[in-house]
Image (spheres, rainbow, N blue to C red):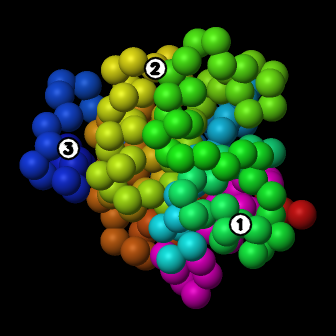
């Protein structure tokens, strides 16, 4: 397998780059082993469709199955409430990234810092900048659920076509068993 390249060509990520997620089951294992994972979901998740289903619906299923609180960014909170799903928190993406960097922040439930942050449904360049800040100034492991390789995450899927991306998301969702 060749080295993945960032989808955003004009930016240079530096010498430390994300490990490629070649098996979605690895993401399930990371989530299960995390003490306090957190899902940060942007508004594009309600616009993207995967095999006739909105990305946001798959992310909600993953969050429910993995018992992962969701932070809705931007206008994504509207899409969650339309689905009768209450995210743990709503705040701008930059604010949640800043809180994840803050060693004194006690997390969305006040139980302690989050040790794993999962990112999905954001514009590529916004996620790039958030992950860059966390990579250089934070102490939280990060996973990008996006379709394109994010070099600033700790783990990222490689650049995928829509069918491969759909299969990976479905494998993560199915890795938790039946969603109730």
Q: Quadrant of residue 173?
A: bottom right
At horizontal 46% and vertical 40% (from top left) the residue drawn is 94
Furthest residue toward left: 10
Answer whether residue 7 is magenta in the image. no
Q: Circle 2 is placed at which residue position? A: 138
Quadrant of image for the C terminus:
bottom right
Residue 107: image location, x then y, percent: 71, 27
| Left or right of 89 in this view: 125 | left
| Left or right of 114 in this view: 24 | left
Residue 3: image location, x then y, percent: 20, 44
Q: Which one is earlier in the sequence, the residue at label 2 or at label 3?
A: 3
Q: Nearer the viewer, residue 8 or 85?
A: 85
Of badges 2 and 3, nearer the viewer stands: 2
Which residue range is magenta in the image? Answer: 48-66
Q: Are marks 2 and 1 in contact (CB under 8 Å)?
A: no
Relative to 47, say whether 109 is above or below: above
Relative to 138, say whether 180 is above or below: below
Number of other residues with Cα within 10 Å of mark 3, as a class: few under 14, some 14 to 19, many 20 or more: few
Q: Circle 1 is placed at which residue position? A: 80
Q: Secondary structure at mark 3?
A: loop
Q: Which one is earlier in the sequence, the residue at label 2 or at label 1?
A: 1
Number of other residues with Cα within 10 Å of mark 2, as a class: few under 14, some 14 to 19, many 20 or more: some
At horizontal 74% and vertical 33% (from top left) the residue drawn is 108
Chief SS of the magenta region: helix
Answer whether residue 60 is magenta in the image. yes
What is the CA distance from the residue labelled 2 to the residue labelled 1?
A: 28 Å
């Amino acid at each position: 397998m060749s080295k993945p390249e960032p989808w955003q060509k004009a930016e240079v990520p530096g010498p430390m780059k994300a490990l490629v997620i070649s098996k979605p089951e690895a993401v399930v294992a990371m989530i299960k082993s995390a003490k306090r994972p957190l899902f940060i979901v942007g508004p594009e998740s309600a616009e993207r469709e995967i095999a006739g289903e909105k990305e946001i619906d798959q992310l909600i299923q993953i969050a429910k199955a993995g018992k992962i609180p969701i932070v809705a960014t931007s206008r994504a909170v509207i899409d969650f409430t339309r689905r009768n799903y209450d995210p743990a928190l709503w705040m701008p993406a930059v604010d949640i990234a800043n809180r994840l960097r803050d060693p004194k922040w006690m997390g969305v439930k006040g139980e302690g810092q989050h040790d794993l942050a999962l990112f999905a449904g954001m514009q590529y360049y916004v996620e790039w900048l958030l992950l860059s800040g966390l990579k250089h100034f934070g102490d939280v492991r990060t996973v990008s659920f996006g379709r394109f390789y994010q070099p600033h995450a700790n783990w990222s899927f490689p650049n995928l076509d829509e069918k491969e991306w759909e299969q990976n998301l479905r494998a993560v969702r199915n890795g938790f068993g039946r969603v109730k």
